[in-house]
Amino acid sequence: MATVEHCLYCFESLAAHLAGRKSLALEDIEKLYAEFCEADNTPTGQDGQTESDTGGSKMGAIKKRIPALSRLAKTSSSSSGPSSPSSGSSLSLATDTPDTSMSSLETETERAAPLTESPLFVTWNTVSARSGNTNLRGCIGTFEAQELEEGLSSYAITSAIHDMRFDPISKRELPTLEVAVTLLTDFEDCDDAMDWEFGTHGLRISFTDRGRRYGATYLPDVASEQGWTKEETLVSLMRKAGWVGKKDKWQDVDLKVVRYQGRRNTCNTLSTSNGGIGSNLKERHR
């Protein structure tokens, strides 16, 4: 499944690109994040001071290596909702949501063998420090399996800079951003256009109409998030592909529908007006 480290690596890749510097490698992020968590869990004595004099300095050094961690107020692999703002800075982390995750079904073998490649999507949102509301800022991915280090870096930048629906993300926007990494799994041909489940399946459609070929996708949470019916979802997806036919004629089009699932992780950096951070865990994909 997608991990916190994958999200941090997307932030690092984008920040490095915008700053014109070389990004840390995914392996470096994974190592530093493990060290950060270890330092963060340093036990405290009765006087409230850490038993290790090196814990704080070690965390500070790691934060400098991974800029997104400089906003870390709380790290939690089980956060499922908003928490109150902190007086520190933050990176809020959310694990896979139940409606798009298969993590509970993973075998011991799958957990023991880290994923090295996968089809993937990277989604950027801006998060309002005042309301916690999110707005889509870019989302691009691929259905071809990618080596994770190269794929995450490439699509973190591509979705931030080259999504033609939006202006390129700027360096000044970094503190307001949320990233979601979705690793795609379990691709299946649908028996018909309605052969899929809300919140479980993403959809990839393809069709030909009047000699023109069309195709588009929605990630697993879009339909349920928007409150659409299955018919509304399919028509919206056809519109997204560029189809301009009459809405009540959509069933006359021979749709090929592939369903898939997504294993996702989300994190954001959200500065509040008083310098604190809220760990708002909005999750939106397009």
Image (cartoon, rainbow, N blue to C red):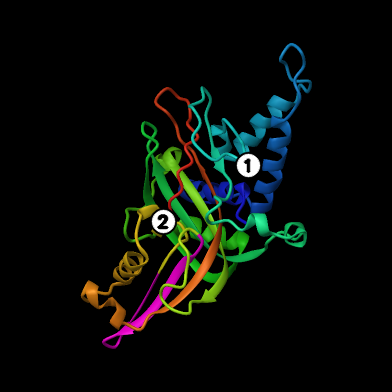
Task: Pinpoint residue 18: horizontal percent, then vertical percent.
Answer: 46, 48
- Which residue appears at 32% of the width and 53% of the height? 167
Quarter of the image where the C terminus is located: bottom left
Amino acid type of the residue tagged 1 in the rendering: Ser
At label 2, counting other C-alpha atoms closer than 10 Å, the crowd grade (few under 14, some 14-19, many 20 or more) is some
The residue tagged 1 is: 77
At label 1, counting other C-alpha atoms closer than 10 Å, the crowd grade (few under 14, some 14-19, many 20 or more) is some
User: Is residue 21 among the parts visible in the rendering?
Assistant: no
The residue tagged 2 is: 224
- Give the alpha-carbon distance from disc 1 to disc 2, as whole Å: 24 Å
- Which residue appears at 38% of the width and 80% of the height? 255
Q: SS class of the residue under badge 1?
A: loop
State which mark lies toward you, 1 or 2: 2
Task: Pinpoint residue 59: horizontal percent, then vertical percent.
Answer: 67, 31
Is the residue under label 2 in contact with that under label 1 (CB below 8 Å)?
Answer: no
Location of residue 274 by image quarter: top left
Task: Pinpoint residue 82: horizontal percent, then vertical percent.
Answer: 49, 35
In the image, taking residue 236 as reference, residue 277 lies left or right, namely right
In the image, taking residue 267 as reference, residue 42 lies left or right, namely right
Rendered position, 163 above or below 44: below
Rendered position, 275 above or below 247: above
Please provide the residue range marked out in magenta: 200-216
Is 176 in front, or is 219? 219
Q: SS class of the residue under badge 2?
A: helix
Q: How many marks?
A: 2
Magenta stretch prevailing secondary structure = strand
